[in-house]
Amino acid sequence: MLDTILILLAYLLGSVSTAIIVCKIMGLPDPRSEGSGNPGATNVLRVGGKKPAAITLFGDTLKGLLPVLIAQAFSREPLIIGLVGLAAFLGHLFPIFFGFKGGKGVATMLGVLFGLNVWVGAATGLTWLLIAKGLKISSLSALIATALAPLYLWLIIGNLELVILTTIMTLILFWRHRSNIQNLLSGAEGKIGKKSD
């Protein structure tokens, strides 16, 4: 019963859309109706600039981190802890409070990874930063970093259950980025901070 409660609470916390709340508080346009239409940090950067984007990034990361840390306080089962992380991730993508229309999950997945193991999170985050710094394309950075995340997790932790759950998150994240992948293939994907999607 406790495991079910932890998973449910993780989903509900993930369902709190940082981007929408931050934009509303700061008097910015709803990110779902501006830019790419995605309620995430990259689009908030387009809509409102660096400060609201940074707050959104922090909030979305925290949504993945906190449920995993709480789960670890109550359970030693890697499967349960991983399922709690997956639930928070799915809450961000399909938030019950916002008509099941959420973000793409990059920051929340990163928070989950930091919760599972700080070195896995750091390796994934550093991969994103290095690629973003070099290529200036957020979606490509996210796709490469999250594609490598299961490998990092396997090399650092070596737990197959967590690797499988992380791989599931990666596959869902790729599916959520399908329009970005099409744009990347056609050369139409926008740079970080630019108004174009």
Image (cartoon, rainbow, N blue to C red):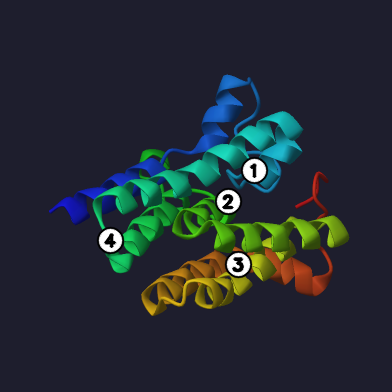
Q: Of marks 1 and 3, which one's residue comes earlier in the chain?
A: 1
CA–CA distance between discs 2 and 1?
8 Å
Which dot, 2 or 1, sits closer to the camera?
2
91 in relation to 48, above or below? below
Q: Which residue is mark 1?
A: 41
Considering every residue shown, the one lying at the far right of the view is 134
Q: Which residue is mark 3?
A: 146
Q: Which residue is mark 2?
A: 107
Looking at the image, do the residues carrying marks 2 and 1 touch, with CB atoms under 8 Å apart? yes
Q: Of marks 2 and 3, which one's residue comes earlier in the chain?
A: 2
Q: Position of residue 26 (x, y in %)?
A: 63, 21
Q: How crowded is the residue under tag 4: few (<14 C-alpha within 10 Å), some, or many (20+)?
A: few
Do we see residue 60 in this rendering?
Answer: yes
Camera-nearest residue between 91 and 33: 91
CA–CA distance between discs 2 and 4?
25 Å
Q: Residue at x 73, y 39 (%)?
A: 45
Q: Residue at x 47, y 55 (%)?
A: 112
